């Protein structure tokens, strides 16, 4: 298969939005990015990010917060955006994703507020004490296509798994064979299966594409996101990404997931944190 | 001085809002919470949190994201709220803070999106690997009233310093005497000066009340917040709080500040992250 390019890939086609009126967009939520029954939250975020990138004068998402209100379903959807503020180097906007229910009523799925800027115009200074995640080489990590003896790291055959080139660190994949580490960690190599290179928009998918850290805590079941904030800190270099997610505090039935995304040049390109409901299933 | 109580304290009076119409509130931004020229971002967040607590059916902020659009000034302000979704255990709302400029135009200061719930109704389970910050005892930390030989840890005599009982860990106060650690850390004991106990609303102030971590990196000058997200994870126990803030990645002229707040019972009660512009001043 020829390698897909930015702008001409499955991800780009499935996150396309069509401007119907100023600030109003039509979209078609693809069934190709579902996991179990739900449309993946990172895919939805990328779609909202594309609409905001059109509505705002700056090209790149720098801070994007999403509140997940109701479960999206594959099919038609509308996005309405509002430009909140336009500055010289940054602009701020909101977006709402709505779908029409069977009874004809409009249901809001997602509410987003975001700050956009131009990552290409930023100075090149980096002073970081963060370290890239310690993760084994790609070929030693586990994908959905791992041999039966290795057990697939991604449970079931979900649509999104076909579109991602996700390789889990074996140290955080023990839950797939009933032996979670108990630490609340998840680490993986991440790419798009058709070879499309990463960009700021696809990073919005990347931060929410790994199995839940709750699995590594020995919990099973659904982990619905309440709120997810992503900071895109730099345009990613081409090549595979490394993602490290950690949960440090499960309390009162909620947990946070802190994600870092590192590019092939060893730069920290995205940080995200989400607040999610802890699953009810136990080890 | 008699100890102030929740509901009857300077913080409560200065964050009071008056409902003018359904979802619309009048407020008076106090000059008592300014630092240098600006009204403190955490104080503003608490004020918005109070309005949302009135507008939404659930009492406690659980996830609050604020985008800081323009600099607020002491004086009259209005808050308009929108109820986005009302669920059984959580509700979602937005709020906008506006002030009237000298030429009579309305200027938006702050846009907030938040999820509210009832922290008192959550189960008491805690499974945390996070550790309380290593911070010396209160009496070994440095306050604004430290003797001249110790140098005040809070620069200048700012209004907010009189309202906080803030004691910096000496290890993160070196910048005040020209010897920053270079690590990007800030740790302190935190209380309200009048003795009011902490609650979820005051935690919104707490996460943005310490000197910027950039000072510990050897940078000086203003560190304007672009976006700040706070998760309130638990109602704090009475008594002093410990706050630890760390910056791990300064890149492209921006930095993140990750804060944790721990209560006197050794529970992690709040986590926050902000994206801010790095100051232009250098060591």
Image (cartoon, coloured by chain):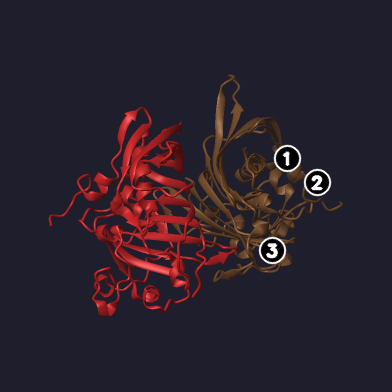
Chain colours: A red, B brown
Name the element at disc 2: loop
Q: Which residue is mark 2?
A: B8
- Taking A150 as reference, is A21 above or below it? above
For the residues marked 2 and 3, what is the alpha-carbon distance in whole angstroms? 28 Å
**The residue marked by circle 2 belongs to what chain?**
B
Q: Earlier in the sequence, mark 2 or mark 3?
A: 2
Numbered-mark total: 3
Residue B149, horizontal then vertical, whole percent? 71, 59
- Taking B231 as reference, is A61 above or below it? above
Q: Which residue is mark 1?
A: B14
Q: Earlier in the sequence, mark 1 or mark 3?
A: 1
Q: Which label lies toward us, 1 or 3?
A: 1
Camera sees residue B228: yes
Q: Is residue A72 left or right of residue B218?
A: left
For the residues marked 2 and 1, what is the alpha-carbon distance in whole angstroms? 10 Å
Residue B218, horizontal then vertical, whole percent? 51, 55
- Taking A216 as reference, is A39 above or below it? above
Both labels 2 and 3 in a single chain: yes
Residue positioned most to the top: B103
Residue A196, horizontal then vertical, whole percent? 22, 53
Q: Is residue A55 left or right of residue A184?
A: left
Q: Which residue is mark 3?
A: B141
Residue B69, horizontal then vertical, whole percent? 52, 36
Disc ID at residue B223: none
């Amino acid at each position: 298969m020829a390698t897909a390019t930015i702008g001409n890939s499955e991800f780009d086609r499935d996150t396309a939005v069509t401007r119907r009126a100023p600030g109003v967009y039509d979209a078609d939520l693809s069934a190709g990015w579902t996991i179990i029954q739900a449309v993946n939250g990172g895919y939805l975020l990328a779609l909202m990010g594309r609409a905001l990138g059109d509505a705002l004068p700056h090209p790149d998402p720098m801070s994007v917060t999403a509140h997940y209100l109701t479960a999206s379903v594959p099919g038609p959807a509308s996005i309405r955006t509002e430009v909140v503020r336009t500055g010289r180097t940054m602009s701020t906007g909101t977006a709402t994703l709505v779908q029409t229910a069977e009874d004809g009523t409009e249901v809001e799925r997602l509410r987003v507020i975001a700050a956009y800027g131009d990552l290409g115009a930023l100075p090149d200074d980096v002073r970081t004490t963060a370290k890239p995640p310690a993760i084994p080489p790609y070929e030693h990590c586990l994908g959905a296509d791992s041999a039966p003896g290795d057990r697939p790291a991604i449970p079931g055959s979900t649509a999104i798994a076909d579109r991602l080139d996700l390789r889990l660190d074996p140290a955080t994949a023990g839950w797939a064979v009933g032996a979670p580490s108990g630490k609340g960690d998840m680490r993986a190599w991440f790419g798009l299966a058709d070879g499309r290179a990463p960009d700021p928009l696809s990073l919005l998918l990347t931060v929410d594409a790994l199995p839940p850290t709750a699995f590594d805590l020995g919990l099973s079941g659904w982990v619905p996101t309440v709120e997810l904030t992503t900071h895109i800190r730099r345009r990613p270099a081409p090549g595979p990404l490394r993602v490290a997610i950690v949960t440090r505090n499960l309390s009162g039935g909620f947990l946070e997931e802190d994600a870092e995304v590192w590019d092939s040049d060893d730069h920290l390109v995205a940080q995200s944190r989400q607040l999610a409901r802890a699953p009810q299933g136990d080890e």
